[in-house]
Image (cartoon, rainbow, N blue to C red):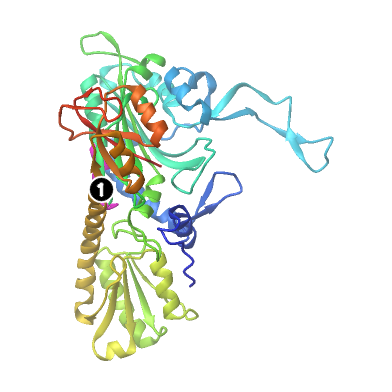
Amino acid sequence: MAKEITNREENYSQWYNDIVKKADLAENSAVRGCMVIKPYGFAIWENMKAVLDQAFKDTGHQNAYFPLLVPKSLFEAEEKNAEGFAKECAVVTHYRLQTDPDNPGKLRVDPNAKLEEELIIRPTSEAIIWNTYKNWIQSYRDLPLLINQWVNVMRWEMRTRPFLRTAEFLWQEGHTAHSTKQEAIEEAELIHELYARFAEDYMAMPVIKGYKTESERFAGADNTLTIEALMQDGKALQAGTSHFLGQNFAKAFDVKFLTSENKEEHVWATSWGVSTRLVGGLIMTHSDDEGLVLPPKLAPIQVVIIPIPKPSDEIMEVADKVAEELKALGIRVKIDRDMKKRPGFKFAEYEMKGVPVRIGIGKRDLEKGLVEIARRDTKEKESIALTDCVSHVHGLMTTIQDNLLARAKKHRTDHTSTVDTFEEFKQVLEEKGGFIYAHWDGTEETEDKIKTETKASIRCIPDDTVNEDGVCVYSGKPSKRRVLFAKAY
């Protein structure tokens, strides 16, 4: 299998695109800016989805489904939300095609089939959901309402990249309603923590937890909580957001409830979501110049067994026994039974796909009671007694998972800087990149000027930030804390 992967140092963007293609994760579709997620890429997303879905259900949430199309009048109801997404909306105006009389064999929009009201293809679902909640919520007994949905959304992006930014993408979006402000805030914080644990425990991707500045908040939110990860090229990736919406959507859609004191009040709300961009984050956090590297917890294939030089009855008997024992331990195993491809080709293929562990079973090794075990994360190979193979590989699942997280944390530490002047800020950004902790005067004007001059934005005000008197790196005005800056995807 030809390598054909661009070196990360030469062209990081092309390296990323090469992995998406060569690891068989996704490809461009006939619709500009949209992608086809191929089975191997979709299997990674399914593994993410399964873990998150169970976590949502374990915390009391239920899944539902709401329509893809949103009437324009509903979309306009919450002004900040409508304004925030207006430029990304795809709009349905007609409901029928007809044969074009001027161009036989072609179709055109039927001018007589114009919709009475234009429909927005959902860029997010607050509007259609809160219009529905109005009918579901009457009393405090109906609260809290904890709903999630797994769907696709459409945001008409002009500059796209598979998984990271596409016109259509898959995600989950939670939308909850509560009787008190504090309960809604606690819900947003609960999901914020859930996302952070998932990123670190399953993706082996360390994140900084914090909240967005006012200009970076979700449109229509009172507060946006975020987890920010650092990719290998020194850019940040917003990996998941949880929003405290206050009563903004409840007031826009007149969603009220009768309290236990028989008073009518608007409900308090949250929304939250992660998307298929997590697959992009996974690629960029761990992969190398030989291809994809996957943490075992999310790898579609955790262990591949390859007969050497090709399948034989003796080798396959051992392979089947090892696979059966690994599967009994809950490990996802594949035996490559292909008779046509040579072992070297197979090694390169599974290395490209990021399979965490490879077991090579050859006749000569079996005569010595040995098998060869190779790790994808370190590329180390060792001969292990066949009798110890299963327990050794079982242990490697945790070892590799922990190593990938430790490696990613070290990269983040090595690419995190603290600066006190704007000259330092620009120098670090140019020479090193990564996360930069710096004082900011708290004004949107300064935030915009820094972003315009450097393309670096405030990723978040970290949860663990401490009060520290200082001066803004840009304006020189007083500042009470440092915030987290970076260039971002």
Circle 1 is placed at which residue position?
Answer: 206
Up-down relation of residue 428 to residue 210 (above or below): below
Q: Judging from the image, what secondary structure is the residue with disc 1 in? A: loop
Kindly tell me whether residue 60 is visible in this rendering.
no
- The amino acid marked with disc number 1 is Pro
Closer-to-camera residue (21/358) = 21
Figure quadrant of residue 447: top left
Q: Position of residue 291 (x, y in %)?
A: 40, 63
Image quadrant for the C terminus?
top left
Q: Position of residue 377 (x, y in %)?
A: 29, 65
The residue sitting at 38% across, 68% down in the picture is 351
- Seen in the image, is 262 located left or right of residue 253? left
- Seen in the image, is 252 located left or right of residue 93? left
Up-down relation of residue 314 to residue 143 (above or below): below
Figure quadrant of residue 334: bottom left
* Residue extent of the magenta highlight: 193-204
Q: Position of residue 106 (x, y in %)?
A: 77, 41
The residue sitting at 48% across, 32% down in the picture is 123
- Seen in the image, is 86 located left or right of residue 226? right
Q: Is residue 418 magenta?
A: no
Up-down relation of residue 452 to residue 142 (above or below): below
The residue sitting at 53% across, 23% down in the picture is 71
What kind of secondary structure does the magenta stretch mostly adopt? Answer: helix
| Number of numbered discs visible in the structure rendering | 1
Closer-to-camera residue (31/478) = 478
